[in-house]
Amino acid sequence: MPVLKLLLVRHGQSVGNTEGRMEGGSSTQLTPLGQQQALRLGQHLAANHWHPTHLYCSPLERARATLAALAGESPPHSAQFSSVTLGSRPPVPVTWLEDLREYDAGILTGLTWAEARDRYPDLCHQLETSLDWQPIPQAETLDAGQARAQRIVDHLIGHHRNGDRVLVISHHWILQQIIARLLGCDRAWGLPMGHTAQFEFWLDCDRWADPGPNRLNTELWRIQRFNDTTHLE
C-alpha cells in the first residue's frame, strides 16, 4: 500500500554551533564538517534509493547550505533556488517555508551564553536557577511555536498524497515541535539531535483525519527512522 513518506532532517553543523551561539532566527554558514555531513546524507539517500518527490527547507543560511551540499554542490551556495538535481534524477522542486525557521530567541539571538550573561545577568540567572519556562524579551512564545509546528504538519499532509516522498530540512527546536504534533502529543519532548539526524514517518494521508480504531492501527502509522545518524559512521 502506498503511503506518504516524510523525512525530517536537521541541518549540518554551522559555525554558530561550534561557537556555542544561540543562532535562532539568525544564521551562519556550515563548517567544513557540516558540509561533509550533508554530502554524506545525500550519498546515503541515493544509495538507499530514497529519492524525494518534494523538498521543503528553512530559509535560514545553515539549512539552505545543507540542502545545497546534500545535492552535491561544492562549495554549497546559499541562494534560494527553485529546484535541485539529486544524482541523475529529474530536478526536485524546493519550497522555502518560513514556518520551518528555528525558534526566535529574541534578545539572546546570536549570543553565546557568556555574552548573554554579561548583557542580561538577571535574565540568565533566572534561566539558570529555575526549570519553569522563563519568557525571553522579544522571543517567540511557546504557543506561537506550537502553532507554527501544527501549520507545518497540516500543510505537509494537506498538500501531499500517498506515494509522495517529502524531504524537510529544518532546525532542532522546531523539529521537536513538529515531531510532537505528528505523534499527537500535548507536550514537546526534549531529545539530543545530531546534525543531519533523520526522522522518517510513514502515514496514510487518506485516513489521517479519520476518527475511530484506525487511529490505533499501527499498519497506517509507522516510525521508520528516529534520530538516525548512521550515514555519518
Image (spheres, rainbow, N blue to C red):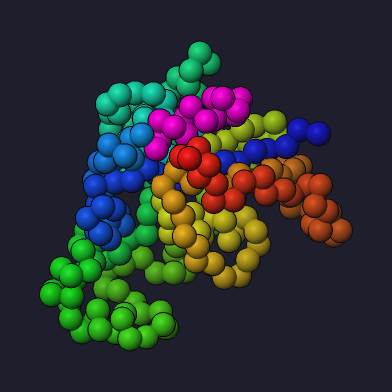
Quick one: 31 or 222, which is closer to the camera? Answer: 31
| Rendered location of residue 171, percent (x, y) | 41, 51
| Rendered location of residue 183, percent (x, y) | 65, 59
Asked if residue 111 is positioned above or below residue 129 in the image, the reply reads above
Residue in view at x 50 percent, y 59 percent: 176
In this image, 86 relative to 165: left or right?
A: left
Residue in view at x 29 percent, y 53 percent: 17
Quick one: 174 or 152, which is closer to the camera? Answer: 174
In this image, 79 relative to 8: left or right?
A: left
Question: Is residue 137 rendered magenta in the image?
Answer: no
Question: Is residue 48 rendered magenta in the image?
Answer: yes
Find residue 81 and report its image quarter: top left
Res 100 visible: no
Q: How many marks?
A: 0
Residue in view at x 44 percent, y 32 percent: 40
| Rendered location of residue 41, percent (x, y) | 47, 34
| Rendered location of residue 93, percent (x, y) | 48, 26
In this image, 200 relative to 233: left or right?
A: right
- Quadrant, the N terminus: top right
Residue situated furthest left in the rendering: 118
Asked if residue 206 is positioned above or below residue 19 in the image, the reply reads above
Magenta span covers which residues? 37-54
Query: For the stretch drawn in magenta, what is the main secondary structure?
Result: helix
Residue in view at x 54 percent, y 30 percent: 45
